[in-house]
Amino acid sequence: MDRRRIKPVEALSLHVPEPLVRPGDKPDFSHVDIPEPGKARRPPENCTAMDIRDLARGVVRVLDGNRAVGEWAQDTDLDTCVKGLRAMIKVRAYDERMLLAQRQGKTSFYMQCKGEEAIAVGQRLALQPGDMCFPTYRQQGLLIAQDYPLLEMICQIFSNSHDTLRGRQLPVLYSSKEYGFFSLSGNLGTQFVQAVGWAMASAIEGNDRIASGWIGEGSTAESDFHSALVFASVYKPPVILNVVNNQWAISSFQGVSGGESITFAERAHGYGIPSLRVDGNDFLAVYAVSRWAEQRARANLGPTLIEWLTYRVGPHSTSDDPSQYRPKEESEAWPLGHPIERLKNYLIAQGRWSEEQHEQTVAELQQEVLDATRKAETYGTLDDGPMPSATDMFEGVYKEMPDHLKRQRQKLGV
Protein backbone atom coordinates (compact mmCIF):
# COMPACT_ATOMS: atom_id res chain seq x y z
CA MET A 1 0.00 0.00 0.00
CA ASP A 2 1.22 3.45 -0.91
CA ARG A 3 1.24 5.40 2.34
CA ARG A 4 2.60 8.65 0.92
CA ARG A 5 0.72 11.62 2.23
CA ILE A 6 0.10 15.06 0.77
CA LYS A 7 1.91 17.66 2.78
CA PRO A 8 -0.60 19.99 4.47
CA VAL A 9 -0.40 23.68 3.66
CA GLU A 10 0.19 26.25 6.34
CA ALA A 11 -3.21 27.89 5.81
CA LEU A 12 -6.27 26.95 3.79
CA SER A 13 -7.52 29.26 1.08
CA LEU A 14 -10.39 29.65 -1.34
CA HIS A 15 -10.27 29.96 -5.11
CA VAL A 16 -11.94 33.20 -6.13
CA PRO A 17 -12.58 33.30 -9.91
CA GLU A 18 -11.15 36.32 -11.69
CA PRO A 19 -11.71 37.37 -15.32
CA LEU A 20 -8.66 37.18 -17.55
CA VAL A 21 -8.79 40.89 -18.33
CA ARG A 22 -9.96 44.12 -16.75
CA PRO A 23 -10.72 47.59 -18.13
CA GLY A 24 -7.69 48.87 -20.00
CA ASP A 25 -6.42 45.37 -20.83
CA LYS A 26 -6.45 43.76 -24.25
CA PRO A 27 -9.54 41.51 -24.73
CA ASP A 28 -8.73 37.81 -24.40
CA PHE A 29 -11.07 34.97 -25.41
CA SER A 30 -8.41 32.29 -25.53
CA HIS A 31 -10.39 30.31 -22.96
CA VAL A 32 -13.32 29.93 -25.39
CA ASP A 33 -12.74 26.74 -27.39
CA ILE A 34 -14.57 27.12 -30.70
CA PRO A 35 -14.50 24.13 -33.09
CA GLU A 36 -14.80 24.42 -36.85
CA PRO A 37 -18.30 24.86 -38.32
CA GLY A 38 -20.03 21.67 -39.42
CA LYS A 39 -17.97 19.35 -37.21
CA ALA A 40 -20.71 18.63 -34.65
CA ARG A 41 -22.78 15.56 -35.46
CA ARG A 42 -26.57 15.57 -35.49
CA PRO A 43 -27.83 12.71 -33.29
CA PRO A 44 -31.28 11.12 -33.51
CA GLU A 45 -33.96 12.81 -31.41
CA ASN A 46 -34.38 9.71 -29.22
CA CYS A 47 -30.79 9.82 -27.96
CA THR A 48 -29.91 9.71 -24.28
CA ALA A 49 -27.74 12.10 -22.30
CA MET A 50 -24.89 9.59 -22.41
CA ASP A 51 -25.15 9.36 -26.21
CA ILE A 52 -24.35 13.05 -26.73
CA ARG A 53 -22.00 13.97 -23.90
CA ASP A 54 -19.54 15.30 -26.47
CA LEU A 55 -22.07 17.84 -27.76
CA ALA A 56 -22.23 19.49 -24.34
CA ARG A 57 -18.49 20.15 -24.55
CA GLY A 58 -18.20 21.21 -28.19
CA VAL A 59 -20.20 23.84 -30.08
CA VAL A 60 -22.80 23.20 -32.78
CA ARG A 61 -22.02 25.57 -35.67
CA VAL A 62 -23.49 25.74 -39.17
CA LEU A 63 -22.35 28.99 -40.79
CA ASP A 64 -18.86 28.80 -42.25
CA GLY A 65 -18.41 32.25 -43.68
CA ASN A 66 -21.15 32.47 -46.31
CA ARG A 67 -21.77 28.71 -46.46
CA ALA A 68 -23.99 26.38 -44.42
CA VAL A 69 -22.07 23.20 -43.61
CA GLY A 70 -22.49 19.97 -41.66
CA GLU A 71 -25.34 17.70 -40.61
CA TRP A 72 -27.28 20.50 -38.91
CA ALA A 73 -27.36 22.60 -42.09
CA GLN A 74 -30.29 20.68 -43.57
CA ASP A 75 -32.88 22.09 -41.19
CA THR A 76 -33.13 25.75 -42.21
CA ASP A 77 -34.70 26.93 -45.48
CA LEU A 78 -34.01 30.35 -46.97
CA ASP A 79 -37.55 31.64 -46.37
CA THR A 80 -37.09 31.05 -42.64
CA CYS A 81 -33.71 32.77 -42.78
CA VAL A 82 -35.23 35.86 -44.40
CA LYS A 83 -38.00 35.94 -41.81
CA GLY A 84 -35.43 35.56 -39.06
CA LEU A 85 -33.23 38.33 -40.44
CA ARG A 86 -36.15 40.77 -40.64
CA ALA A 87 -37.15 39.93 -37.07
CA MET A 88 -33.60 40.46 -35.78
CA ILE A 89 -33.35 43.81 -37.56
CA LYS A 90 -36.67 44.81 -35.99
CA VAL A 91 -35.46 43.76 -32.53
CA ARG A 92 -32.35 45.88 -33.01
CA ALA A 93 -34.40 48.90 -34.15
CA TYR A 94 -36.75 48.48 -31.18
CA ASP A 95 -33.86 48.25 -28.72
CA GLU A 96 -32.22 51.38 -30.09
CA ARG A 97 -35.44 53.41 -29.94
CA MET A 98 -36.32 52.27 -26.41
CA LEU A 99 -32.80 53.00 -25.19
CA LEU A 100 -33.16 56.52 -26.56
CA ALA A 101 -36.57 56.86 -24.91
CA GLN A 102 -35.05 55.95 -21.57
CA ARG A 103 -32.30 58.54 -21.99
CA GLN A 104 -35.03 61.10 -22.76
CA GLY A 105 -36.80 60.30 -19.49
CA LYS A 106 -39.83 58.66 -21.10
CA THR A 107 -39.25 55.45 -19.13
CA SER A 108 -37.22 54.56 -16.09
CA PHE A 109 -35.41 51.47 -17.25
CA TYR A 110 -34.54 49.40 -20.32
CA MET A 111 -32.54 46.27 -21.18
CA GLN A 112 -31.20 45.52 -24.64
CA CYS A 113 -30.40 42.14 -26.19
CA LYS A 114 -27.78 43.54 -28.56
CA GLY A 115 -25.65 40.72 -29.96
CA GLU A 116 -28.11 38.04 -28.79
CA GLU A 117 -30.94 38.61 -31.29
CA ALA A 118 -30.60 35.25 -33.08
CA ILE A 119 -31.29 33.13 -30.00
CA ALA A 120 -34.82 34.21 -29.11
CA VAL A 121 -35.86 34.82 -32.73
CA GLY A 122 -34.48 31.51 -33.97
CA GLN A 123 -36.13 29.45 -31.26
CA ARG A 124 -39.50 31.17 -31.51
CA LEU A 125 -39.62 30.40 -35.22
CA ALA A 126 -38.98 26.74 -34.39
CA LEU A 127 -41.87 26.61 -31.91
CA GLN A 128 -45.60 26.41 -32.64
CA PRO A 129 -48.57 28.56 -31.63
CA GLY A 130 -49.74 27.52 -28.18
CA ASP A 131 -46.27 26.71 -26.88
CA MET A 132 -45.41 28.73 -23.79
CA CYS A 133 -42.12 30.57 -23.24
CA PHE A 134 -40.83 31.50 -19.79
CA PRO A 135 -38.25 34.16 -20.65
CA THR A 136 -35.80 36.47 -18.98
CA TYR A 137 -35.71 40.18 -19.77
CA ARG A 138 -33.53 39.75 -22.87
CA GLN A 139 -35.93 37.69 -25.01
CA GLN A 140 -38.01 40.45 -26.60
CA GLY A 141 -37.34 38.59 -29.85
CA LEU A 142 -39.83 35.92 -28.77
CA LEU A 143 -42.58 38.50 -29.17
CA ILE A 144 -41.23 40.43 -32.13
CA ALA A 145 -40.63 37.25 -34.15
CA GLN A 146 -44.40 36.66 -33.93
CA ASP A 147 -45.26 40.22 -34.96
CA TYR A 148 -46.59 41.08 -31.51
CA PRO A 149 -47.94 44.67 -31.69
CA LEU A 150 -45.06 47.07 -31.07
CA LEU A 151 -47.51 49.64 -29.73
CA GLU A 152 -48.47 47.37 -26.85
CA MET A 153 -44.83 46.65 -26.01
CA ILE A 154 -43.95 50.35 -25.99
CA CYS A 155 -46.99 51.32 -23.91
CA GLN A 156 -45.82 48.80 -21.33
CA ILE A 157 -42.34 50.36 -21.40
CA PHE A 158 -43.86 53.83 -20.88
CA SER A 159 -46.29 52.60 -18.16
CA ASN A 160 -48.93 54.82 -19.74
CA SER A 161 -52.73 54.78 -19.85
CA HIS A 162 -52.73 52.06 -22.56
CA ASP A 163 -50.29 49.76 -20.73
CA THR A 164 -52.03 46.36 -20.84
CA LEU A 165 -50.40 45.51 -17.50
CA ARG A 166 -51.76 48.73 -15.95
CA GLY A 167 -48.38 49.81 -14.59
CA ARG A 168 -48.00 46.72 -12.39
CA GLN A 169 -44.75 45.54 -13.97
CA LEU A 170 -41.36 47.15 -14.42
CA PRO A 171 -40.53 48.17 -17.99
CA VAL A 172 -39.43 45.19 -20.17
CA LEU A 173 -41.36 42.71 -18.02
CA TYR A 174 -43.96 41.94 -20.70
CA SER A 175 -46.72 39.36 -20.52
CA SER A 176 -48.95 37.81 -23.18
CA LYS A 177 -50.78 34.52 -22.84
CA GLU A 178 -52.02 34.77 -26.43
CA TYR A 179 -48.46 34.96 -27.75
CA GLY A 180 -47.05 32.33 -25.40
CA PHE A 181 -45.00 34.80 -23.34
CA PHE A 182 -45.32 34.08 -19.62
CA SER A 183 -45.15 37.09 -17.31
CA LEU A 184 -41.54 37.90 -16.54
CA SER A 185 -40.21 37.82 -13.03
CA GLY A 186 -37.49 40.09 -11.71
CA ASN A 187 -36.49 37.25 -9.36
CA LEU A 188 -34.15 35.44 -11.73
CA GLY A 189 -34.33 31.67 -11.90
CA THR A 190 -38.00 31.27 -11.05
CA GLN A 191 -38.95 30.97 -14.71
CA PHE A 192 -37.05 27.67 -15.05
CA VAL A 193 -39.15 26.05 -12.33
CA GLN A 194 -42.30 27.53 -13.82
CA ALA A 195 -41.45 26.23 -17.31
CA VAL A 196 -40.95 22.69 -16.03
CA GLY A 197 -44.17 22.85 -14.00
CA TRP A 198 -46.16 24.19 -16.96
CA ALA A 199 -44.76 21.43 -19.19
CA MET A 200 -45.71 18.83 -16.59
CA ALA A 201 -49.25 20.23 -16.52
CA SER A 202 -49.40 20.12 -20.32
CA ALA A 203 -48.44 16.44 -20.24
CA ILE A 204 -50.95 15.68 -17.49
CA GLU A 205 -53.69 17.29 -19.59
CA GLY A 206 -52.59 15.23 -22.59
CA ASN A 207 -52.30 18.13 -25.02
CA ASP A 208 -49.53 18.83 -27.53
CA ARG A 209 -48.11 22.11 -26.23
CA ILE A 210 -44.54 22.35 -24.98
CA ALA A 211 -42.70 24.83 -22.77
CA SER A 212 -39.49 26.77 -23.32
CA GLY A 213 -37.65 28.04 -20.25
CA TRP A 214 -34.92 30.69 -20.31
CA ILE A 215 -32.16 31.59 -17.91
CA GLY A 216 -28.80 33.37 -18.00
CA GLU A 217 -25.57 31.64 -17.10
CA GLY A 218 -25.35 33.68 -13.89
CA SER A 219 -28.71 32.39 -12.68
CA THR A 220 -27.60 28.77 -13.01
CA ALA A 221 -26.07 29.38 -9.58
CA GLU A 222 -29.58 29.83 -8.17
CA SER A 223 -31.26 26.89 -6.44
CA ASP A 224 -34.28 27.25 -8.75
CA PHE A 225 -32.12 26.09 -11.65
CA HIS A 226 -31.29 22.83 -9.90
CA SER A 227 -34.83 22.31 -8.63
CA ALA A 228 -36.08 22.61 -12.20
CA LEU A 229 -33.55 20.07 -13.45
CA VAL A 230 -34.51 17.58 -10.75
CA PHE A 231 -38.18 17.67 -11.72
CA ALA A 232 -37.32 17.65 -15.43
CA SER A 233 -35.11 14.59 -15.03
CA VAL A 234 -37.65 12.68 -12.94
CA TYR A 235 -40.87 13.39 -14.83
CA LYS A 236 -39.41 14.06 -18.30
CA PRO A 237 -41.90 16.79 -19.29
CA PRO A 238 -41.94 18.37 -22.77
CA VAL A 239 -39.66 21.34 -22.10
CA ILE A 240 -36.64 23.05 -23.67
CA LEU A 241 -34.29 24.49 -21.04
CA ASN A 242 -32.25 27.37 -22.48
CA VAL A 243 -29.13 28.76 -20.79
CA VAL A 244 -27.98 31.97 -22.49
CA ASN A 245 -24.28 32.24 -21.71
CA ASN A 246 -23.54 35.83 -22.72
CA GLN A 247 -20.34 35.86 -20.58
CA TRP A 248 -21.55 38.46 -18.07
CA ALA A 249 -24.14 38.42 -15.26
CA ILE A 250 -24.36 42.15 -14.58
CA SER A 251 -20.70 42.76 -13.65
CA SER A 252 -19.80 39.16 -12.78
CA PHE A 253 -18.07 37.14 -15.49
CA GLN A 254 -19.23 33.61 -16.25
CA GLY A 255 -16.52 32.00 -14.10
CA VAL A 256 -18.25 33.20 -10.93
CA SER A 257 -21.17 30.91 -11.80
CA GLY A 258 -18.91 27.92 -12.37
CA GLY A 259 -17.97 28.38 -16.01
CA GLU A 260 -14.29 27.75 -15.31
CA SER A 261 -14.90 24.14 -14.29
CA ILE A 262 -17.30 22.71 -16.88
CA THR A 263 -19.61 24.08 -19.52
CA PHE A 264 -23.10 25.06 -18.44
CA ALA A 265 -24.48 22.42 -20.80
CA GLU A 266 -22.52 19.74 -18.93
CA ARG A 267 -24.42 20.52 -15.74
CA ALA A 268 -27.36 18.63 -17.22
CA HIS A 269 -25.33 15.39 -17.19
CA GLY A 270 -25.72 15.01 -13.46
CA TYR A 271 -29.47 14.86 -14.02
CA GLY A 272 -29.41 12.57 -17.03
CA ILE A 273 -30.78 15.30 -19.33
CA PRO A 274 -29.50 15.45 -22.93
CA SER A 275 -27.70 18.74 -23.55
CA LEU A 276 -25.93 20.61 -26.29
CA ARG A 277 -23.75 23.70 -26.61
CA VAL A 278 -24.52 25.94 -29.58
CA ASP A 279 -23.12 29.01 -31.34
CA GLY A 280 -25.80 31.51 -30.32
CA ASN A 281 -24.69 34.03 -32.95
CA ASP A 282 -25.35 31.54 -35.78
CA PHE A 283 -29.03 31.80 -36.71
CA LEU A 284 -28.95 28.56 -38.70
CA ALA A 285 -27.50 26.65 -35.75
CA VAL A 286 -30.01 28.22 -33.35
CA TYR A 287 -32.98 27.30 -35.50
CA ALA A 288 -31.75 23.77 -36.28
CA VAL A 289 -31.02 22.83 -32.67
CA SER A 290 -34.24 24.45 -31.45
CA ARG A 291 -36.23 22.41 -33.95
CA TRP A 292 -34.40 19.26 -32.85
CA ALA A 293 -35.23 19.94 -29.19
CA GLU A 294 -38.80 20.89 -30.08
CA GLN A 295 -39.29 17.62 -31.95
CA ARG A 296 -37.88 15.68 -28.97
CA ALA A 297 -40.33 17.36 -26.63
CA ARG A 298 -43.27 16.93 -29.02
CA ALA A 299 -42.44 13.21 -29.40
CA ASN A 300 -42.63 12.74 -25.61
CA LEU A 301 -38.87 12.17 -25.34
CA GLY A 302 -38.44 14.58 -22.46
CA PRO A 303 -36.38 17.70 -21.74
CA THR A 304 -33.35 19.10 -23.54
CA LEU A 305 -30.93 21.64 -22.11
CA ILE A 306 -29.19 24.00 -24.54
CA GLU A 307 -26.34 26.36 -23.70
CA TRP A 308 -26.26 29.27 -26.14
CA LEU A 309 -22.76 30.67 -26.46
CA THR A 310 -22.98 34.41 -27.13
CA TYR A 311 -21.85 37.81 -25.86
CA ARG A 312 -23.76 40.66 -24.25
CA VAL A 313 -22.65 43.59 -26.40
CA GLY A 314 -24.47 46.31 -24.51
CA PRO A 315 -24.65 47.12 -20.81
CA HIS A 316 -26.62 44.88 -18.47
CA SER A 317 -29.27 47.59 -18.33
CA THR A 318 -29.56 51.36 -18.64
CA SER A 319 -28.34 51.48 -15.02
CA ASP A 320 -25.05 49.78 -15.88
CA ASP A 321 -21.67 50.98 -17.18
CA PRO A 322 -19.73 47.94 -18.51
CA SER A 323 -16.56 49.98 -19.02
CA GLN A 324 -16.10 49.71 -15.26
CA TYR A 325 -15.51 45.95 -15.35
CA ARG A 326 -14.47 44.90 -18.88
CA PRO A 327 -12.42 46.31 -21.77
CA LYS A 328 -14.35 48.67 -24.05
CA GLU A 329 -13.18 46.74 -27.12
CA GLU A 330 -14.19 43.33 -25.79
CA SER A 331 -17.44 43.05 -27.77
CA GLU A 332 -15.57 43.70 -31.01
CA ALA A 333 -13.11 40.92 -30.17
CA TRP A 334 -15.84 38.30 -29.52
CA PRO A 335 -14.80 35.45 -31.87
CA LEU A 336 -18.32 34.42 -32.98
CA GLY A 337 -19.12 37.73 -34.65
CA HIS A 338 -22.53 39.38 -34.88
CA PRO A 339 -25.71 37.40 -35.67
CA ILE A 340 -27.34 39.96 -37.97
CA GLU A 341 -24.24 40.49 -40.10
CA ARG A 342 -23.54 36.77 -40.36
CA LEU A 343 -27.06 35.91 -41.53
CA LYS A 344 -27.18 38.90 -43.89
CA ASN A 345 -23.93 37.84 -45.58
CA TYR A 346 -25.15 34.26 -45.90
CA LEU A 347 -28.40 35.31 -47.57
CA ILE A 348 -26.56 37.64 -49.95
CA ALA A 349 -24.29 34.74 -50.96
CA GLN A 350 -27.40 32.61 -51.62
CA GLY A 351 -28.91 35.27 -53.85
CA ARG A 352 -31.86 35.91 -51.51
CA TRP A 353 -30.74 39.29 -50.13
CA SER A 354 -28.67 42.33 -51.10
CA GLU A 355 -26.98 45.26 -49.42
CA GLU A 356 -29.58 47.59 -50.93
CA GLN A 357 -32.44 45.42 -49.68
CA HIS A 358 -30.83 45.30 -46.27
CA GLU A 359 -30.56 49.09 -46.04
CA GLN A 360 -34.18 49.48 -47.16
CA THR A 361 -35.37 46.94 -44.60
CA VAL A 362 -33.45 48.63 -41.79
CA ALA A 363 -34.97 51.99 -42.72
CA GLU A 364 -38.47 50.50 -43.06
CA LEU A 365 -38.38 48.77 -39.68
CA GLN A 366 -36.81 51.76 -37.93
CA GLN A 367 -39.70 53.85 -39.23
CA GLU A 368 -42.22 51.25 -38.06
CA VAL A 369 -40.74 51.39 -34.56
CA LEU A 370 -40.66 55.20 -34.62
CA ASP A 371 -44.30 55.41 -35.70
CA ALA A 372 -45.33 53.02 -32.91
CA THR A 373 -43.30 55.05 -30.39
CA ARG A 374 -44.95 58.31 -31.40
CA LYS A 375 -48.37 56.71 -31.15
CA ALA A 376 -47.54 55.34 -27.69
CA GLU A 377 -46.45 58.80 -26.56
CA THR A 378 -49.95 60.12 -27.27
CA TYR A 379 -51.15 57.84 -24.47
CA GLY A 380 -48.51 59.22 -22.12
CA THR A 381 -44.99 58.42 -20.96
CA LEU A 382 -43.49 57.92 -17.53
CA ASP A 383 -43.01 61.65 -17.00
CA ASP A 384 -45.74 63.14 -19.16
CA GLY A 385 -49.38 62.39 -19.84
CA PRO A 386 -52.10 60.19 -18.35
CA MET A 387 -51.10 57.29 -16.16
CA PRO A 388 -52.97 54.15 -15.12
CA SER A 389 -55.41 54.92 -12.32
CA ALA A 390 -54.32 54.24 -8.74
CA THR A 391 -57.41 52.01 -8.54
CA ASP A 392 -55.70 49.55 -10.88
CA MET A 393 -53.16 48.48 -8.26
CA PHE A 394 -55.98 46.91 -6.27
CA GLU A 395 -57.63 45.11 -9.18
CA GLY A 396 -56.73 41.79 -10.75
CA VAL A 397 -54.74 40.51 -7.77
CA TYR A 398 -57.37 38.47 -5.93
CA LYS A 399 -60.55 36.91 -7.25
CA GLU A 400 -62.32 38.51 -4.30
CA MET A 401 -60.64 41.56 -2.82
CA PRO A 402 -59.74 40.99 0.87
CA ASP A 403 -60.89 43.47 3.50
CA HIS A 404 -57.47 44.98 4.16
CA LEU A 405 -57.15 46.03 0.51
CA LYS A 406 -60.65 47.45 0.53
CA ARG A 407 -59.70 49.57 3.53
CA GLN A 408 -56.48 50.76 1.85
CA ARG A 409 -58.34 51.74 -1.27
CA GLN A 410 -60.92 53.66 0.75
CA LYS A 411 -58.15 55.57 2.54
CA LEU A 412 -56.72 56.57 -0.86
CA GLY A 413 -60.17 57.62 -2.00
CA VAL A 414 -59.95 55.74 -5.30
Image (cartoon, rainbow, N blue to C red):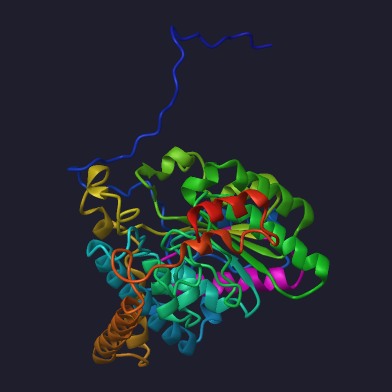
Residue 347 relative to residue 236: left or right = left
Quarter that holds the N terminus: top right
| Residue lying farthest to the left in this orientation | 24
Residue drawn at (40%, 65%) of the image = 116
How many circles with numbers are drawn on the protein?
Answer: 0
Res 87 seen here? yes
Residue 2 relative to residue 164: left or right = right
Q: Quadrant of residue 25?
A: top left
Q: Nearer the viewer, residue 187 or 31?
A: 187
Where does residue 82 sit, x and y in percent of width and height? Answer: 42, 86
Res 285 seen here? no
The answer to whether 272 is drawn above or below residue 337 in the figure is above
Where does residue 328 sit, x and y in percent of width and height? Answer: 21, 52
* Residue 282 among those drawn in magenta: yes
Q: Nearer the viewer, residue 41 or 153?
A: 153
Residue drawn at (50%, 81%) of the image = 146
The answer to whether 75 is drawn above or below residue 245 in the figure is below
Where does residue 45 sit, x and y in percent of width and height? Answer: 69, 69
* Residue 42 among those drawn in magenta: no
| Segment tinted magenta in the rendering | 276-303
Residue 252 relative to residue 272: left or right = left
Q: Nearer the viewer, residue 117 or 61?
A: 117
Residue drawn at (40%, 73%) of the image = 155
